[in-house]
Image: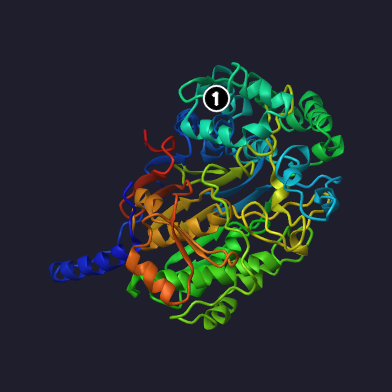
Amino acid sequence: MKPVRTWAVAILLPLLLSLLAPALAGVPSSPPVIAAHPPGAAIASGHALATEAGLQILRAGGNAFDAAVTVSATLSVVEPISSGLGGGGFFLLHDARTGKDVFLDARETSPEAATPARFLDAAGALDRNRSENGPWSAGIPGLPAALVELAHKYGKLPLATTLAPAIRIARDGFPVYARMESGYGERRAVMERYPGTRAVFLADGHPPKVGETFRQPDLARTLQAIADKGFDGFYRGPVADRLLAGVRAEGGKWTAAELAGYRIREREPLRFLYHQWTITTAPPPSSGGVALAEILQMASGWDLRALDPAHRVHILVEAMRRAYRDRTIHLGDPDFVRVPVARLASADYAAGLRASINPDKATPSSLLPGQPAPLEDNETTHFSIIDRDGNRVSATQTINLLYGSGLVAPGTGVLLNDEMDDFALKPGTPNAFGVMGFAANAPKPGKRMLSSMAPTFMESPDKVAILGSPGGSRIITEVLLGILGYDDGLTAQQVTQVPRFHHQWLPDVISAENGALDPATVKALQAMGHTVNAGEAPWGNMQTVEWDKRGNTLSGGSDPRNPVGKAAVLPQP
């Protein structure tokens, strides 16, 4: 992979335009032709089988929302390391017929029994084993409800059709890939505690091996129950009974009422302007949209393209620092706490924060640094879809850490999430991703934990881009750099290759992929007072599609950091 340096593009694009200017000076101007509909459809997802399954549904007459059901369910089968029916997600939708954008919140919810005291050890410290592993770490899943909502309210095809590819792949199997094998190795000690998990992942007598066929017959039957009975196929009846029994057998406590009472929340997306782009993105309980609005509006006070690499990174890092501080203090589930979204996302608020940025010197973070934030390159997944009518989906779904809680409820094939760790279980104590929280993100019955997932649309007068990525607390900065890549004129594939760097207030360090920052830039940043870790392994898995209305072309980009992902364009028949 040869990453694209955005500052290189910033230098070359103006130079190219200046060279072309004399030749264009004598050409009569005419209004650009802007296409009303895309010339086909495009899908980018974290696994080729999911992308191909989505294209199959589009060929069968489905729309982007039908394809989203198929891609989401297929990813739940082929990426157990990243997401699944036992987790949740966010779905950002654009209905081309009405012009309406809507945000489907399928985030997991806290069980009533999961009080903060349940996650403390005898000394009053956070019990990380309980918050990250097994039944107590799992929230009530939301993804199955999202599949039903998408199909019934927005799709054209029945669930029996859109879930058929995922059911077939779960039943017949798919080849194990390297991330599955290595991830199992990291989580093996936890996963093999539970008989339901052993029945799935040790079915052949040994852990998954690259190239072997991995089959999940119980998961196929659970998907079939959803296809047959919709919401009740998962949240009531035999599947629900098995989920409850599986959690109870390992010492946890869910109730039938909590499962049956789960509901999707339909929310108004967050919108703001950056240069010529309208950015439509995730509202709380995601912190992603608010943080993006803060960072980009702070950064808009500088011409980033005109800055040298070190100052460009410095300005963005200072904006990241301030946005992540606000994330920690203010954000939570808006159904339970008052989140000052309008103020935090306003241009005036950003201007006030911008005024506190010294353009040549780092601002030390307020508190003592915590532990370095672990990577989440193998966890969570994202897909982007646009259809021939212009309907769009940007969706990010997860079970949190590698293989979630590690617990498969026997007889269901459902690997449960460990999203309870995303709550502030002990105020002021960092979670698995090194981010902290306080009262706004404390668990309460039915409450949704704060997330960084940031499915996003970008729209200018002549372009539409759909993007998102996994990455834990780094999702926000990955999407940020993707937005800046599109703003710099990069193609969809180039956007996925942009080198990544990150700052999240605490720990007070710039993290960067190996090679993302050259030695001179690192030295200049250090001279400004930054601590820089410039040698980290690559992270993230961006999936994006772009519609160029002026040329009426579609393109997709799939992150080369993930070799099993795929972006594909389906031409207009």
Residue under circle 1? 208
Question: Residue 569 location in percent, x, y?
Answer: 38, 38
Q: Residue furthest front?
A: 123
Residue type at mark 1: give it: Pro
Residues packed near mark 1 inside 10 Å, few (<14), some (14 to 19) or many (20 plus) = many
- Determine if residue 221 is in view: no
Using the image, determine if residue 214 lies above or below residue 395.
Answer: above
At 83% from the left edge and 54% from the top edge, which residue is drawn?
123
Using the image, determine if residue 20 lies above or below residue 147.
Answer: below
Q: Quadrant of the C terminus?
A: top left
Residue 460 lies in what quarter of the image? bottom left
Label 1 element class: loop
Query: How many marks overall?
Result: 1
Question: Residue 119 location in percent, x, y?
Answer: 80, 49
In this view, the residue in front, 123 or 467, is: 123
Question: Residue 268 location in percent, x, y?
Answer: 65, 58
Using the image, determine if residue 364 lies above or below residue 495.
Answer: below
In this view, the residue in front, 363 or 558, is: 363
Question: Residue 353 location in percent, x, y?
Answer: 57, 78
At 83% from the left edge and 40% from the top edge, which residue is drawn?
258
Using the image, determine if residue 236 lies above or below residue 46.
Answer: above
Residue 304 lies in what quarter of the image? bottom left
142 with respect to 316 (left or right):
right
224 with respect to 444 (left or right):
left
- Determine if residue 25 is in view: yes
